[in-house]
Image (tube, grey):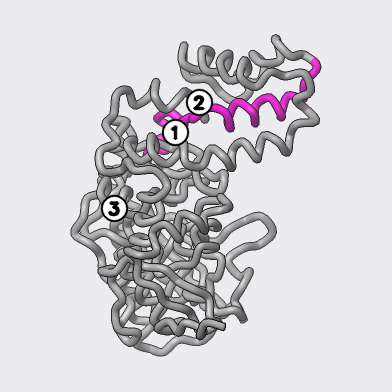
Amino acid sequence: MAPKTTRPVLDTRSLNRATLARQLLLGRAEMSAADATRHLLGLQAQNVKPPYFQLHARLAGFRPAELAGLMESRQAVRIVTMRSTIHTHTAADALVLRPLVQPARDREVRYFRKGLVGVDLDRLAELARVFVETEPRTMGEIREELLKEWPDADPQSLSVAARCRLPLVQVTPRGVWGKSGQVRLTTLSEWVGDVDPGSGAGGMDAAVLRYLGAFGPASVKDMQTWAGLTRLREVFERLRPGLAVFQDENGVELFDLPDGPRPDADQPAPPRFLPEFDNLLLSHADRTRVIDPELKGRTWSGNQAHCTLLLDGFLAGLWKLDAATLTVELFSAASKASRAEIVAEGERLIADMTEAGESAEEGAKASSGSVRFGAIRA
């Protein structure tokens, strides 16, 4: 029997600091919104505002108008990709990443097959494509158009099939900071035109390397959780000779880029306010690198996700911004110094993220907002 291979062990704090470094959360990066969105492989965008707050936590000098401008110029788009959820991607990344997750979209359609008896899915995709490329349509309008062809089919199943078979983007003003708009859809190619994916190209091998660059060190199951895909082991095995390999304290094999940042476990991590659905909390099968097992499930109430606070790099509480008042609810007591850091970071959030898109008078009010601590959520 061959001897068991021993890999260098990365403990929880080491994994935490390495991941925070990739996620631009150990210190705000001097990086454009477009470059950061690409580096992070997209921003979770189930709701409209979270992508803006994700970038504020990570970038020096970020203002919502920068990402809003990318949306309005069609350099960034909202589209269903990883885990069947909406993400904001650069246009080039959307063109690369959306086809990679098509197997998961095909699997999703199969869940609705009982409502699609007699429906030719290729014809459905073509009819829907022509319909939305004529002008952007609501999902209700797409459903009604398809019912003309298949009146006996289940309406929801028809709309799910269209969303899964086609790369549909939510057109602006939806997703633009300070504006509102109904969800209207067209195809990715129709919306962004002839975009060169550039360095974003390269298939699943490149996607694995980029995932490690943004979320590593990570296991195969971690990436499968992030992507909503299965059977990625063979890709990692193909790349193994060029990767650094570690293991966590439970013996799980972790892969990483050889030159990926792995800071000292004692490096300070400033407090950060993350929005609901931040990918830092969703992109690993084992989330203990950020969430203490005793706090598992504390970021949700029913089907509602909460905004979260990181303290010393780990989940430490929840927050809510109401007008210019930021309310913080910690899970346990914090030192006076930590509370002072939280207040300073909170005041920055208020000043930067409540004046954008508002009138000058309202912005002045925002800059004098307050941070308050609610009861500890024991």
Residue 185 colored in magenta in the image? no
Q: Which residue is identified by label 3?
A: 36
Q: Position of residue 284 (x, y in %)?
A: 51, 64
Front residue of 321 and 1: 1
At which x and y percent is residue 345? 33, 70
Q: Which residue is mark 1?
A: 174
Counting residues from the start of the chain, the first of labels 1 and 3 encountered is 3
Q: Amino acid under label 1? A: Arg
- Quarter of the figure with the C terminus: bottom right
What residue lies at 52% left-to-right and 30% top-to-bottom?
183
Residue 179 painted magenta: yes
- Badge 3 marks a residue whose secondary structure is helix
Residue 110 in picture, x, y percent from top left: 71, 36
- Separation of marks 2 and 1 at Cα, in angstroms: 8 Å
The amino acid type found where label 3 is placed reads Ala
Q: Which region shows up in magenta?
A: 152-180
Q: Amino acid at mark 2?
A: Arg
243 to 159, vertically: above or below: below
Q: Horizontal and vertical percent for residue 18? A: 35, 73
Mark 1–mark 3 CB contact (< 8 Å) = no
Q: Is residue 133 above or below residue 75?
A: above
Residue drawn at the location 45% of the way across and 70% of the way down? 309
Q: Secondary structure at mark 1?
A: loop
